[in-house]
Image (cartoon, rainbow, N blue to C red):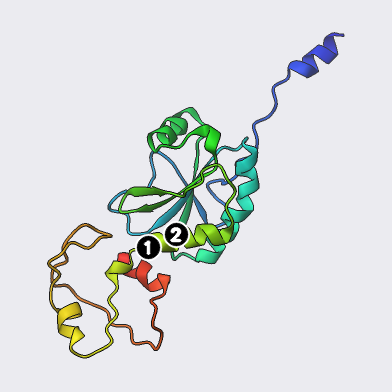
Amino acid sequence: GGRQQQQRTKPKPPPPELYPIKNDLNVARLGAKKYPDPHSKNVWLIVFYKNDDRASVNAKPVVAKLAEGLGGTIKVGAVNCGTPTEARFCEGKGVENGDLPVYSLVLNGEDHIFPNAGTRPTVKALHEFAMEQMPFDLVHNINRVDQLQTKLLAPHREPLESTRQTMRAAPAVMLLTDKYDTSSLYVSLAYQ
C-alpha cells in the first residue's frame, strides 16, 4: 500500500542535457547571456531545443554531424528552451516550444530562421541553408588585371549586404586559385 504510493509519486529525474557545456560535439552552449550579436566575428548556426522534447533528442545526431562537417567554418551552438529564463529568451527570438527543434543562422546579430520549423531536416538541407546565408559579397572574384583597381583597390561606396557598412580602404588578402567558386571557409575568414 504505502510503499507503492511513495514509488508512484517520486518525481522523474530530469532528462540528460543534450548539449552540455563541455561536450565533444563541437556544439557551444548558448543562451540569453551568451548569444551572437552584431559584433560576433563568426557566423553561427544555432539549434533551439528542449531536453525532454523527442524531436530535439532525435535531431542531436544531425546537429553533431553538421558541426563536424562545418569544421569551424560556421560555428554551431545550442540554446536550451526548457528552462524558464531561456524559454523567455527563445520566445523573444520567435521560437515556439511546440515547434522545436528550430534552427537559425546568425549573421551580424540577425537570426535567419530555417524554414519548416519543427521538422527534422537533413544535414544536407541545413548545410545548404547555411551556405545560402553566407556573406559571399565580402569576396571578390578577379578574373582580369583591370578588375584589380575597380574591385579590390578602390574603396567601396555602396554598403555591403552582409555588413550594411561601407568599406573604407583596408588591407586585402589575395588568394590565387584555379577554382572559380569561393570556398565557404574563405568567406568565413573574410567575415571575421
Between the C-alphas of marks 2 and 1, the distance is 6 Å
Mark 2 nearby-residue class (10 Å; few <14, some 14–19, many ≥20): many
Q: Nearer the viewer, residue 146 or 72?
A: 146
From what the image shows, is residue 179 above or below residue 41?
Answer: below
The percent position of residue 75, horizontal first and vertical second, equals 45, 58
> In the picture, residue 181 is in which quadrant?
bottom left
Q: Decide if residue 190 is on the left or right side of residue 132.
A: left
Which residue is rendered at x = 27% and y = 76% of the image? Answer: 140
Q: Residue at x 45, y 37 (%)?
A: 95
Q: Which residue is mark 1?
A: 134
Q: Amino acid at mark 2?
A: Ala
Using the image, determine if residue 15 lies above or below residue 189: above
Position of 95 with respect to 146 (left or right) is: right
**Residue 9 percent across, percent down from the top left:** 74, 16
Proximity of marks 2 and 1: CB atoms separated by less than 8 Å: yes
Residue 191, image quadrant: bottom left
Mark sitting on residue 130: 2
The secondary element bearing badge 2 is classed as: helix
Q: Position of residue 114 (x, y in %)?
A: 46, 50
**Outermost residue, right side:** 1
Depicted 97 relative to depicted 136: above or below: above
